Image (cartoon, grey):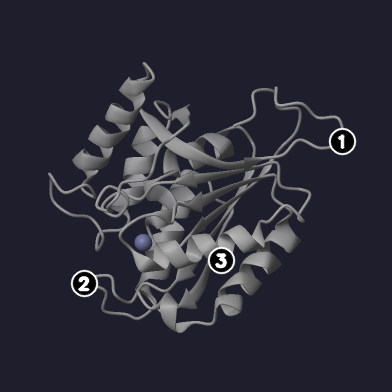
């Protein structure tokens, strides 16, 4: 999401559940990959609550297939209990995030927005805020992404984007990646249907005179050592 790119950037996506990592930023991630950036994803919870999953770790292959389509070089699953992050000590959630950030040294982080209907999302966001605090100097920007069928179902609705990314080039890859998560897909007009996701991208895009977009809330931008925003 930087305007001038002289070298490959390291991009880290942090999400709670399998498919969350692509619902809000899959198109943007695919753009990064197309531009030569290195993208890794962390999915904090396991996916055994996914419907129609008969093998305990079947969600891993769904997640890997989706990551391959988007160009994500690595997707890590931390296997915390699905919909039960509140049973985990807060520092136990923070520690592996800190470790991943320390190892990968990302320039840019996309993190799932926490102000929605899902408690796992809220807790993950709070933990991630600690993990990517400003003591980590490599991080130049942190953006929060929304989650279809969680963010818009919250009250009060507090997700107010300030950044639009044109994903017209990658909307098809995003939908193809989402199709890998057969167990998470719903029929139209559910927000997590393929048509619903496409319509949503179109509606976000039209706000900024684009065909399709993903939107973000800026959590933080930091420019150090003489760098400027543009
Ligand atoms: Zn989720």
Image position, residue 14 (x, y; %): 53, 57
Q: Which dot marks residue 225?
A: 1
Could you tell whether 15 is left or right of 49 in the image?
right
* Residue projecting furthest to the front: 156
Assess disc 3: are there few (<14), some (14-19) or many (≥20) residues with their C-alpha within 10 Å of its C-alpha. Answer: some
Task: Mark 1 or mark 2: name the one nearer the start of the chain.
Answer: 2
Residue wearing tag 2:
52
**Residue appearing at x 33%, y 77% in the figure:** 48
Could you tell whether 199 is left or right of 208 in the image?
left
Could you tell whether 124 is left or right of 61 in the image?
right
- Is there a contact, CB below 8 Å, between mark 1 and mark 2? no
Q: Nearer the viewer, residue 150 or 19?
A: 150
**Residue appearing at x 76%, y 27% in the figure:** 6
What is the secondary structure assignment of the residue under circle 3? helix
- Whether residue 17 is visible: no
Assess disc 2: are there few (<14), some (14-19) or many (≥20) residues with their C-alpha within 10 Å of its C-alpha. Answer: few
Residue 198 in which image quadrant: top left
Q: Is residue 72 above or below residue 166?
A: below
Q: Which dot marks residue 127?
A: 3
Ligand 1 shows up in the quarter that is: bottom left
Query: Ligand 1 closer than 8 Å to the CB at disc 3?
Result: no
Image position, residue 71 (x, y; %): 52, 45
- Whether residue 7 is visible: yes
How far, Cα to Cα, is label 1 from label 2? 51 Å
* Residue projecting furthest to the top: 209
């Amino acid at each position: 999401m930087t305007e001038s790119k002289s070298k490959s950037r390291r991009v880290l996506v942090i999400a709670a559940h399998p498919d969350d990592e692509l619902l809000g930023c899959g198109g943007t991630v695919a753009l990064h990959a197309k531009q030569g950036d290195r993208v890794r994803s962390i999915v904090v919870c396991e996916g055994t609550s996914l419907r129609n999953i008969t093998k305990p770790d079947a969600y891993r292959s769904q997640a890997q297939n989706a990551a391959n389509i988007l160009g994500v070089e690595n997707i890590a699953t931390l296997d915390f209990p699905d919909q039960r992050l509140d049973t985990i000590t807060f520092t136990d959630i923070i520690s592996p995030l800190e470790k991943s950030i320390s190892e990968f040294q990302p320039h840019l982080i996309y993190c799932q927005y926490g102000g929605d209907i899902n408690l796992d999302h809220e807790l993950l966001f709070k933990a991630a805020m600690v993990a990517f605090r400003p003591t980590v100097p490599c991080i130049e920007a942190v953006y929060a992404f929304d989650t279809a069928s969680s963010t818009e179902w919250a009250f009060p609705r507090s997700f107010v984007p300030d950044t639009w990314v044109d994903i017209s080039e990658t909307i098809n890859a995003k939908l193809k990646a989402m199709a890998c998560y057969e167990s998470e897909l719903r029929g139209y007009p559910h927000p997590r249907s393929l048509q619903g996701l496409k319509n949503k991208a179109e509606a976000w895009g039209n706000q900024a005179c684009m065909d399709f977009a993903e939107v973000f809330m800026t959590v933080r931008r930091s420019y150090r050592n003489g760098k400027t925003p543009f």
